[in-house]
């Protein structure tokens, strides 16, 4: 057994930093990387990890002292082979003013921890990703809490402490695990991961009046998860626009009777699908997905349009395949078929997969504008609202025109704002003048 004089290791550019916590006392057993002290500068707090395993025999500093690299702080009687020869002579004074060279190889450099780091519990399942270094060097917690967290695979960097000065207690680690297990907080990598989203408060509404609790339907529960995932993961921007569909709608009405003879109902939606595909061909970033690491964009050479369908059980998004290769009648037939299947609850997985861009049309119902949620991992979605006759100034007089409002929400990681408005402008132009679709 040898006694090791512990000194402040290299703490970067910090000098004369105040000790705000002493995490061990004489007699405590510590392992390598267990925190010994917490220092606090005006920019950061940092913990000084033990460079050795052993028993603390003397603490030579007090709370409120200021220390710099090389200052002597305590003695540890080193256990086993981990002993590092102590500097032979020149034992520093109790409150060291003269720096002692740190035992360089064994003194891990502490990492400054931003004080405002968002606390997020980690799922126990993520334990294999946790490394001892990160657990040892970053958070305020006693050796026993560290050991408890290590045993359960919890990274303390992701746990918020409720003790004095944010110190993490065993109960904080337990609460973090409970939150993940009960689904209040998702583990990193999952929907709510990393966001540290505070839960909505639970309220007993019956204290204010009569209530009825009805369980959400199966589809609503499933679509709810997808919507929430997208809402949390995708940085959304919504571009609003409108277009003049007077001629388009006249053409639709002209075709209506002929279409009906073939059992087809022509609505504006199929024309929008064709205009969208033309714009997607011009702006391939909208017909794409981000790679899982969000470092690349995967552009797709096929054009499968998902259509949000309102059913009595909830929202579903069947996909109309190869829209670029189909005419208006064929698309109308497909649309009627998938929406009937959707409403009868008969859609299979193949009917709902392979989409590249989604359209959500509320135009048959009403509204002026809305912000659809991107159907991730797609990167963009169009929302159609109800077209209305409006007076439009043509340069010399107001003329009645049928104006359709629409919006496109997109993932700002994949698409910039200028591209967003170029895309909506192109869609608007194609819908205003259908002849452009055949160019
Ligand atoms: N402006 C004005 N009228 C419109 C219109 C628009 N943008 N879009 C449709 N219409 C008209 C149609 O022409 C039709 O009128 P006629 O019978 O006189 O021709 C009427 O509204 C009803 O159309 P529809 O809704 O039956 O057909 P569609 O092809 O427009 O839409 C479908 C099909 C499946 C998309 C639709 O029925 C639906 O389910 N919409 C809701 C989607 C939804 O809930 N989205 C929200 C998702 S986010 O929660």
Image: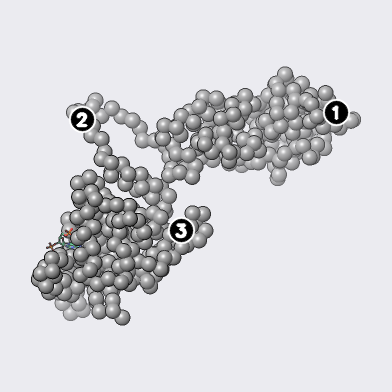
Tell me if I can see residue 346 in this picture.
yes
Question: SS of the residue at dot 2?
Answer: loop
Cα distance in 3D space between marks 1 and 2: 74 Å
Mark 2 or mark 3, earlier in chain: 2
Mark 3 or mark 1, earlier in chain: 1
Mark 1 or mark 2, earlier in chain: 1
The front one of 407 and 281 is: 281
Residue 337, given in percent of the width and then of the height, sits at 21, 59
Q: Is residue 185 left or right of 168 when viewed as pictured? A: left
Q: Is residue 37 left or right of 301 when viewed as pictured? A: right
Residue 388, given in percent of the width and then of the height, sits at 16, 64
Mark seen at residue 404:
none
Q: Is residue 299 left or right of 400 when viewed as pictured? A: right
Q: Is mark 2 within 8 Å of ligand 1?
A: no
Name the residue located 74 percent from the left edge and 33 percent from the top edge.
51
Q: Residue furthest top?
A: 27
Residue 329, given in percent of the width and then of the height, sits at 20, 70
Q: Residue furthest right?
A: 89
Tag nearer the camera, 3 or 1:
3
Tell me if I can see residue 369 in this picture.
no
Question: SS of the residue at dot 1?
Answer: loop
Name the residue located 28 percent from the left edge and 79 percent from the top edge.
438
What residue is disc 1 on? 91
Q: Compared with residue 126, is residue 349 higher up or lower down, i.e. above or below?
A: below
Mark seen at residue 211:
2
Cα distance in 3D space between marks 3 and 1: 59 Å
Q: On the image, which quarter does residue 405 sit in?
A: bottom left
Q: Residues within 10 Å of mark 2 (few under 14, many from 20)?
A: few
Q: Residues within 10 Å of mark 1 (few under 14, many from 20)?
A: few
What residue is disc 3 on? 290
């Amino acid at each position: 057994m040898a006694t090791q004089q512990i000194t402040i290791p290299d703490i970067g550019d910090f000098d004369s930093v105040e000790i705000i916590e002493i995490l061990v006392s004489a007699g405590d057993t510590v392992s390598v990387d267990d925190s010994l002290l917490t220092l606090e500068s005006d920019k950061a707090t940092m913990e000084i990890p033990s460079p050795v395993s052993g028993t603390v025999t003397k603490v030579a500093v007090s709370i409120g002292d200021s220390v710099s690299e090389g200052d002597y702080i305590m003695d540890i009687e080193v256990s086993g082979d981990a002993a590092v020869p102590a500097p032979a002579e020149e034992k520093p004074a109790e409150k060291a003013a003269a720096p002692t060279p740190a035992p360089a190889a064994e003194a891990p450099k502490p990492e400054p921890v931003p004080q405002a780091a968002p606390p997020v519990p980690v799922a126990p399942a993520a334990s294999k990703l946790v490394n001892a270094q990160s657990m040892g060097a970053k958070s305020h917690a006693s050796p026993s809490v560290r050991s408890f967290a290590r045993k359960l695979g919890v990274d303390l960097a992701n746990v918020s402490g409720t003790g004095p000065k944010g110190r993490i207690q065993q109960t904080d680690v337990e609460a973090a695990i409970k939150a993940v297990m009960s689904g209040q907080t998702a583990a990193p990598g999952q929907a709510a991961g990393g966001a540290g989203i505070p839960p909505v408060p639970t309220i007993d509404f019956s204290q204010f009046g009569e209530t009825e609790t009805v369980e959400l339907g199966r589809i609503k529960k499933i679509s709810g998860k997808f919507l929430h995932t997208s809402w949390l993961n995708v940085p959304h921007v919504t571009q609003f626009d409108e277009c003049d569909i007077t001629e388009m709608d006249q053409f639709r009405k002209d075709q209506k009777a002929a279409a009906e003879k073939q059992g087809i109902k022509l609505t504006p939606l199929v024309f929008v699908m064709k205009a969208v595909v033309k714009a997607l061909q011009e702006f391939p970033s909208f017909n794409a997905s981000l790679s899982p690491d969000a470092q690349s964009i995967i552009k797709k050479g096929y054009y499968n349009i998902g259509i949000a369908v309102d059913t009595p059980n909830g929202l579903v998004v069947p996909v109309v395949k190869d829209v670029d290769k189909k005419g208006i009648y064929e698309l109308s037939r497909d649309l009627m078929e998938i929406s009937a299947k959707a409403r009868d609850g008969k859609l299979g997985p193949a009917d709902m997969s392979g989409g590249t861009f989604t359209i959500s049309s509320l135009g048959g119902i009403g509204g002026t504008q809305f912000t659809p949620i991107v159907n991730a991992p797609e990167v963009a979605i169009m929302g159609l609202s109800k077209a209305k006759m409006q007076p439009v100034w043509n340069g010399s007089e107001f003329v009645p025109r049928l104006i359709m409002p629409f919006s496109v929400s997109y993932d700002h990681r994949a698409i910039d704002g200028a591209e967003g408005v170029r895309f909506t402008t192109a869609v608007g132009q194609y819908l205003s003048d259908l002849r452009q679709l055949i160019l």
